[in-house]
Image (cartoon, rainbow, N blue to C red):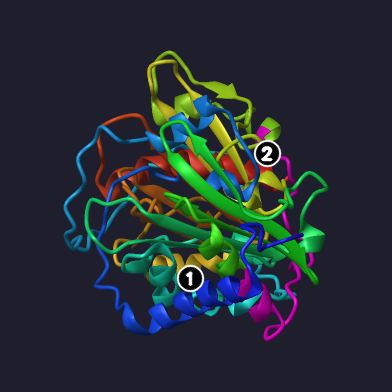
């Protein structure tokens, strides 16, 4: 594929590249700020085009809610009132056969904040999630995001690199940089391609009239791939859960466990190639989302991550995490939402020693972390089904 599709001369192309690299030496991004704008709106370019309605929905999730205050959460000892569930024996930890994560799993190895700043023409800072389930790393992939360092502004830059072997035939390879206007998002410039054993995608919002900077960033990423080991997915272990899992989990009466009158209806997974969601979900291997709704805005979301159990240690070490008892789990915590943009709804994360499950409800007022204790009964019942 062609990265230099702006019909620049060799000299002009070199000048733009020099400008990005030279600017990286001059622009010094300021400290991080938590902002609440266009949540996840750019992720679609990592998995191909989507409908305007889908991107509008993703962009506006939670947009009408106030940003929560950033305060330290006091330590609370929690004793959940568990409803008896079928007993099942937690698995002993399984030694992990590791794969190789692209760029050693470090977004600073993909692009520096200075390079992102020079490309976007404004100070940019890395914007990682508060915690991760590890599903990208299990596929050998990395997804990175940088945002404008100025509060209340929206420029964003995304980069994703995955093993080519983990991709499906429908994953895009663009013919050079593509710039397009997407409703409720604006102008987006993105490029995707294959280099050696890797598939990569770079996207910028808002895209400038000149897409040369996005092409230069892609060149830098491709060049750096050679300095790191080729990414590979972690081989499946014998005790890993099988995907898809949602149909099996629908046998659990989640409404009864949560005390929701009127019941909850399972819905078909929305996380497909046409949805604005990370690559690890679209490939149908790294993890799966299962959902239940009540028709009044209540959502229960369950993330199933085969082989993701080792991620719990790092999640438990985050500032807001608190231990909780879950029958059938070797360890579990309640923790602040991993949504780096808003984080309104806490999550219960549990492991059977090998795999990982995350339970979360939304569609209500923002909650305290300890409110997620009520998900313990649901998590236990779901673990019992997944263990069969």
Please name the residue shown 58% across and 52% down the image: 190
Helix, strand or loop status at disc 2 = loop
Quadrant where the N terminus sits is bottom right
Give whichever of 207, 227 is nearer the camera. Answer: 207
Q: Note whether 271 is above or below 169 in the view shown.
A: above
Q: How far apart are marks 1 and 2 (CA)?
A: 31 Å
Question: Measured from the top left, where is residue 335 in percent x and y?
Answer: 36, 55
State the residue position of label 1.
313
User: Which span of residues is magenta-colored?
Assistant: 219-246
Closer to the camera: disc 1 or disc 2? 2
Question: Measured from the top left, where is residue 136 in percent x and y?
Answer: 62, 61
Q: Horizontal placement of 374 versus 241: left or right? A: left
Using a 10 Å C-alpha cutoff, classify the residue at mark 1 as few (fewer than 14 neighbours), some (14 to 19) or many (20 or more).
Answer: few
Task: Reply yes or no: does residue 220 show up in magenta.
Answer: yes
State the residue position of label 2.
273
Give whichever of 233, 192 is nearer the camera. Answer: 192
Quadrant where the C terminus sits is top right
Question: Measured from the top left, where is residue 95 in percent x and y?
Answer: 71, 75
Question: Measured from the top left, where is residue 184 in percent x and y?
Answer: 41, 33
Please name the residue shown 61% across and 57% down the image: 6
- The answer to which quarter of the image holds residue 333 is bottom left
């Amino acid at each position: 594929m062609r990265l230099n599709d702006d019909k620049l001369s060799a000299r002009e192309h070199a000048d733009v590249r020099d400008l990005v690299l030279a600017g990286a030496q001059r622009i010094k991004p300021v400290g991080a700020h938590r902002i609440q704008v266009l949540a996840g709106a750019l992720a679609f370019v990592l998995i191909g085009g989507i409908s305007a309605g889908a991107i509008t929905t993703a962009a506006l999730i939670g947009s009408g809610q106030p940003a929560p205050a950033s305060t330290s959460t006091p330590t609370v000892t929690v004793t959940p009132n568990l409803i008896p569930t079928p007993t099942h024996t937690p698995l002993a930890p399984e030694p992990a056969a590791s794969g190789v994560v692209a760029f050693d799993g470090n977004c600073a190895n993909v692009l520096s904040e200075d390079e992102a700043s020079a490309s976007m023409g404004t100070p940019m800072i890395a914007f990682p999630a508060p915690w991760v389930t590890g599903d990208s790393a299990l596929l050998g992939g990395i997804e990175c995001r940088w945002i404008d360092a100025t509060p209340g502004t929206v420029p964003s830059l995304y980069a994703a690199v995955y093993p080519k072997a983990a991709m499906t035939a429908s994953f895009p390879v663009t013919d050079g940089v593509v710039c397009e206007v997407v409703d409720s998002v604006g102008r987006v410039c993105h490029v995707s391609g294959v280099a050696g054993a890797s598939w990569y995608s770079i996207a910028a919002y808002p895209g400038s009239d000149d897409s040369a900077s996005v092409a230069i960033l892609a060149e830098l990423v491709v060049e750096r791939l050679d300095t790191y080991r080729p990414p590979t997915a972690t081989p499946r272990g014998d005790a890993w859960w099988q995907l898809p899992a949602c149909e099996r989990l629908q046998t659990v009466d989640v409404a009864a466990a949560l005390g929701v009158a009127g019941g909850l209806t399972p819905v078909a997974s929305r996380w497909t190639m046409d949805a604005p969601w990370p690559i690890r979900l679209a490939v149908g291997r790294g993890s799966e989302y299962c959902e239940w709704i009540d028709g009044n805005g209540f959502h229960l979301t369950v993330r199933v991550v085969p082989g993701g159990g080792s991620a719990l240690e790092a999640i438990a070490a985050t500032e807001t995490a608190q231990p909780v008892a879950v029958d059938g789990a070797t360890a579990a915590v309640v923790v602040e939402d991993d949504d780096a943009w808003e984080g309104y709804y806490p999550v219960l994360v549990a492991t059977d020693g090998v795999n990982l499950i995350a339970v979360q409800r939304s569609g209500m007022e923002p909650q305290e972390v300890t409110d997620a204790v009520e998900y313990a009964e649901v998590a236990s019942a779901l673990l019992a089904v997944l263990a069969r």
